[in-house]
Amino acid sequence: MPLTTAPDTLPTSIATEILNLLLPHHRTTDRVPVPAEAFPHQLRRISAFVRDGAPVVFTLPGFPCKSPNPAKVLGHLPDEGERLSLTFLNTLCGEIERIYPPGARVIICSDGHVFGDLIGVPDDHIDAYADDLRTQIGRMDLHRLSVFDLRDVLSDLPHDTKRTHIHERYAPALEALRAETRADDQALALYRGITRFLVEDTADWTGTRSALQRACRQRAYGVIQRSRAWGALVAEHHPRAVRLSIHPQPVGSPKFGIRLLDAPDAWTTPWHSAALHRTDGSWTLMPRAEAAGRGRLVQRDGRDSHFDQS
């Protein structure tokens, strides 16, 4: 007897189940929860993997490097905040595997070199951060995760050459980006959020506050240009993947914003903060200076790791 083809509704049904596992972790500024059907772009992408019986591939640009401001972070290498976030992503893939046996994997697209010169972080610190991410993934046997960075694309070219290459090939024009920021509320929120981070991350500024803000507003456009360029490059290398984002994303966006850990606002990330272990066993993220006032510093493998309230 000829084999019958499974109805097309089955991949969509499984994709909906998979997306329902992501929805509790949706990073967004929207206040009202919405069903999986409100994310048609993600459903189409996930359904395509399910139709092929292949693992669902997610790409997540992020995990660039630590903030250069010592009042916010414990150092320039990954710490408990990153370890908890990596474990969360691997566990999420494991949950998907329970309802869809081919499972899922997350490619962490570490983007520190893309804009390191704009955020004031040395390239050797960025290399050390990404290398340690790979080490942590291997040490914790997080086999559903991998790391992808500019070295996988442009090998051993000088870092400035790599940045120039992707900017010229993929970045949007500055005037177009300015116009988008004026016209679109989400683009404006992103621009303001990055400007705020740049101001906060500048630890050695000797000029006036207003001059710092002007400089950071200009650099924010550069960071967004480079981030867009990196996103385009990632899409070129992983064209079928479901795109995740560490930034808040509106419902219906081609990017699905994902919250890695509990934090007081939708913009805080492990690389802009330190992890605090609360007395109830839960974890949250906050600036190092604030966490130090709430708990004792804990070391792991000879390095500062996190703060503990207990």
Image (spheres, helix red, strand yellow):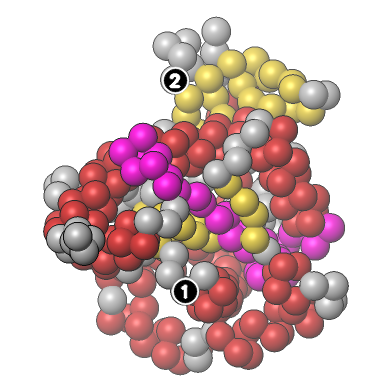
- In terms of secondary structure, where does tag 1 sit? loop
Q: How many marks?
A: 2
Farthest front residue in view? 1
Between the residue at mark 1 and the residue at mark 2, the CA separation in whole angstroms equals 37 Å
At a point 71% along the width and 46% down the height, the residue shown is 134
Q: Quadrant of residue 76?
A: top right
Q: Residues within 10 Å of mark 2 (few under 14, many from 20)?
A: few
Amino acid, disc 1: Pro
Camera-near label (1 vs 2) is 1
The correct choice, above or below, for 297 with respect to 30 in the image is above
Residue 27 in view in this figure: yes
The correct choice, above or below, for 93 with respect to 109 in the image is above
Residue 217 is inside the magenta segment:
no
At a point 66% along the width and 31% down the height, the residue shown is 140
Looking at the rendering, in which quadrant would you find the C terminus? Answer: top right
Closest to the observer: 94 or 281? 94
Task: Indicate the position of residue 201 as horizontal and vertical percent values.
Answer: 63, 53
Task: Indicate the position of residue 244 as horizontal and vertical percent values.
Answer: 42, 58
- In terms of secondary structure, where does tag 2 sit? loop
Q: From the image, tell me which residue sits under label 1.
A: 239
Residue 98 is inside the magenta segment:
yes
Looking at the rendering, in which quadrant would you find the N terminus? Answer: bottom left
Closest to the observer: 174 or 50? 50
Task: Indicate the position of residue 263 as horizontal and vertical percent values.
Answer: 43, 36
Res. 291 mark: none
Residue 267 in view in this figure: no
Mark 1 and mark 2 lie on one chain; the one further toward the N terminus is 1
